[in-house]
Amino acid sequence: MTKAELNQNELKALRRLAEPIIQSSDYQPSSSLLSSSHIGEAVSSMPVPETPSAGVLVKIAYAGSCYTEGKSRSRRFTPQFPGDEVAGTIHDIGNDLPNCNYTVGDKVIIVPEPDSVGTGYAEYIPIEDTTRVIQIPNSVPLEVAAMLPGGALKAYAAVTCARPHVEKLRKVKSCVNVLVVGAGGLGLWTIKLAKYLMGRDNSSVRVFVADNSIDRLLTAQDHGCYDIIHWNEEDHEQYIIERTLDSCRGGVDVIIDFIGSNRCMQRALKVLNRVSVLSEGLILVGGNSTSETSISLNALAAKQQSIVGIPQGNLNQLIELLNAVADNELEIPQYKVFPVEDANQVFEDLCENRLTGRAIFKFGSQSSTHVVDNH
């Protein structure tokens, strides 16, 4: 059987990524994945998984820097490997796969399964259900394709869910204000997708972005949002609310919340408009937070406000995304590619807000860091 070779230091460090990362003053920097004293150590082997008889074996080329957040967004998150953003090539094909349209070397993305995104570091993924393996055109770079099944698809589902509500409001309002909470990767995708799905020159829809990080907000501004709002958690709550309402003149009609913390939700309910009998104020909630909040149902009814969970997105939407990228109709947010050996440092930089935009890991010995900025 063919072997994939990784040194002991790399294996040990990547396994440690399953441990929670602590942010802010509690963060304890980890050692580098490949310290100079360990380069040249004896190489160990990771066996290549068996190819499912009626499936395929995919060799990972790129994977997004995916993670889950704890109850306090500012305190802790846990990296996920391989995550829900994986692109690679067909390495092997099962002998019993009927009506096979795959060939070895095909570029593909993998539609993730919830129970497989955090199973640990791997270089090969066996896929029994080939409907989860989507071939991609040669015009789409693998590192871009990797982002599509995860953050891009979630943002696409959010904007698609918001669009009918926005269109309804445009019939009764001259301008609809959409507030995106969170200027990370999901927020950046949402800015680009709002332009793609609602019209690039549509002055009747204004997209605002709120975040507690100035650096992320400046990145969002570079991506073309109408305005940014600094939600500095050190400020008094009423001051943040008043500043938000002042920025979004005319109030906020639709909120897409990728943070989902208790404080963000309570704040969103206070800045969301009471609309008209024709349409209610809408909050779409998603993201990786596991925090809980209490909401008065009577207040929601009285203010004609609705809270809806952001759908995960479906296969048809993923195909639409892929086609939009392949046809150069959808702008790609800023991203950076890092060798997977630098994963610990990348996650630390994400924790400390030293890294904005998306981080993509490249697998293989020829990895190199590069930046792509399409705005």
Image (cartoon, grey):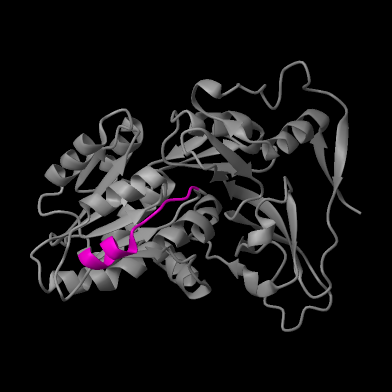
Which residue sits furthest right? Answer: 1
In the picture provided, is 13 more to the left or to the right than 299?
Answer: right
Residue in the picture at 50% in, 71% down: 314
| Residue situated in front as seen by the camera: 119 or 101 | 119
Which residue sits furthest left? Answer: 174
Task: Name the image quarter holding residue 309.
Answer: bottom left
Residue 105 x, y percent position in the rendering: 69, 61
Magenta stretch, residue numbers: 291-302
Look at the image and tell me in which quarter the N terminus lies.
Answer: bottom right
Residue 182 in sight here: no
Task: Name the image quarter holding residue 65.
Answer: top right
Residue 242 x, y percent position in the rendering: 16, 40
Residue 51 x, y percent position in the rendering: 82, 65
Residue 217 x, y percent position in the rendering: 30, 37
Residue 300 in the magenta stretch? The answer is yes
In the picture provided, is 198 more to the left or to the right than 135?
Answer: left
Q: How many marks?
A: 0
Which residue sits furthest top? Answer: 37
| Residue situated in front as seen by the camera: 235 or 298 | 298
Residue in the picture at 74% in, 37% down: 15
In the picture provided, is 66 more to the left or to the right than 197?
Answer: right
Residue 313 in sight here: yes
| Residue situated in front as seen by the camera: 292 or 113 | 292
Rendered view: 187 above or below 109: above
Look at the image and tell me in which quarter the C terminus lies.
Answer: top left
Residue 261 in the magenta stretch? The answer is no
| Residue situated in front as seen by the camera: 216 or 244 | 244
